[in-house]
Amino acid sequence: MASPLELRRRIRSVDNTRQITRAMQLVAASRMRRAQEAVQAARPYATHISGMIERLVLATGNDRLPPILQPRPIERTAFLVLTTNRGLAGPLNTNIVRTAVNEIDSTSDAIEISVVVVGKKGHLALRGLYTLSAVFTDISDQPSVLDIAPVTQLLVDGYERGDFDEVRMIYPEFVNILTQQPRVVRLFPVVLPEVQQDAREADIIFEPDPASVLEALIPRFVEMTVYRAMLELAASEQSARMVAMRAATENATELIEGLRLAYNKLRQARITSEIIDIASGANALADA
């Protein structure tokens, strides 16, 4: 049985840990709110650029679409896997990596595979399984469009050169504080938005011509898609970390209560034993 001194030391140690996890929980909650606001702020731009592409596709015609929109036989596939740089985020990275491995391993053996990873956790998990074509570990957990520009440029250039015929992106979608759902989306060939009726009826003049504008806009559309996924990752990371740290804080509190109960019982037993010894001594003296 542990001594009272050992129990006090354990209580102090667990209490110090609880203070750390509590602080991390509060920081993650604050960052999560900012990340959610960033996701919401990006939506109007994404909606607008999708609407522009709808009109451009209609004005261009299927026979004049740029090569980046033209599907081709798939012989080489690239996977873009988005993970975090830091841990203490519950099962978030594990779920992303598991989804990525399932997607990659289910790809036909006849297709050449390339893997591009964002985040240290994905790098550590996947480097022993596959040959990684590129790794990006210097992107902030509060990313900007400039931060992800090298990633999108690598993918756009690779697709245009024919290094790969398809690109799939795996990332966590922020559903709510308790749920982050791994998603797989196709970046290339670009999935065109469905042309709505109001887009068909719009009378817009594009200069120099719709095809040129569309070709220039598609990389921005892809960039925005990856950027939104990075924002989803940031919100998912902070929410997962907040939940994990809250659980750790609650567990530490329960452990401290158990240790204090054990300490008080041990202390009470010692006091009772001392009282019995004193009473026994007094009785012995009285009988002498």
Image (cartoon, rainbow, N blue to C red):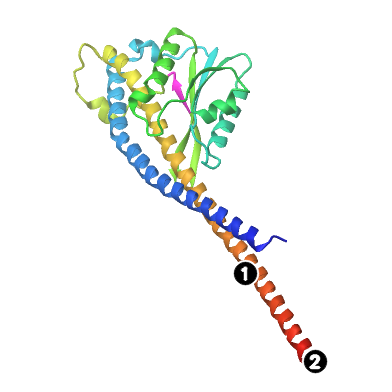
- Residue 159 occupies which quadrant of the picture? top left
Q: Secondary structure at mark 1?
A: helix
Q: Is residue 66 left or right of residue 287?
A: left
Alpha carbon distance from label 2 to label 1: 34 Å
Magenta residues, dominant SS class: strand
Q: Residue at x 30, y 32 (%)?
A: 47
The image quarter containing residue 144 is top left
Q: Nearer the viewer, mark 2 or mark 1?
A: 2
* Residue 31 percent location from the top left of the image: 38, 42
Mark 1, residue position: 264
Assign the N terminus to one quadrant of the image. Answer: bottom right
Across and down, in percent, residue 272 comes to 69, 77
The magenta region covers 185-189
**Circle 2: residue type:** Asp
Asked whether 279 falls inside the magenta stretch, the response is no
Q: Which one is in front, 266 or 248?
A: 266
Image quarter where the C terminus lies is bottom right
Q: Is residue 106 visible?
A: no
Q: Residue furthest bottom?
A: 287
Residue 180 visible in the current orientation: yes
**Upstream in sequence: badge 2 or badge 1:** 1
Q: Quadrant of residue 5?
A: bottom right
Residue on which disc 2 sits? 287
When the figure is inspected, residue 195 is found, relative to residue 8, above or below; the finding is above
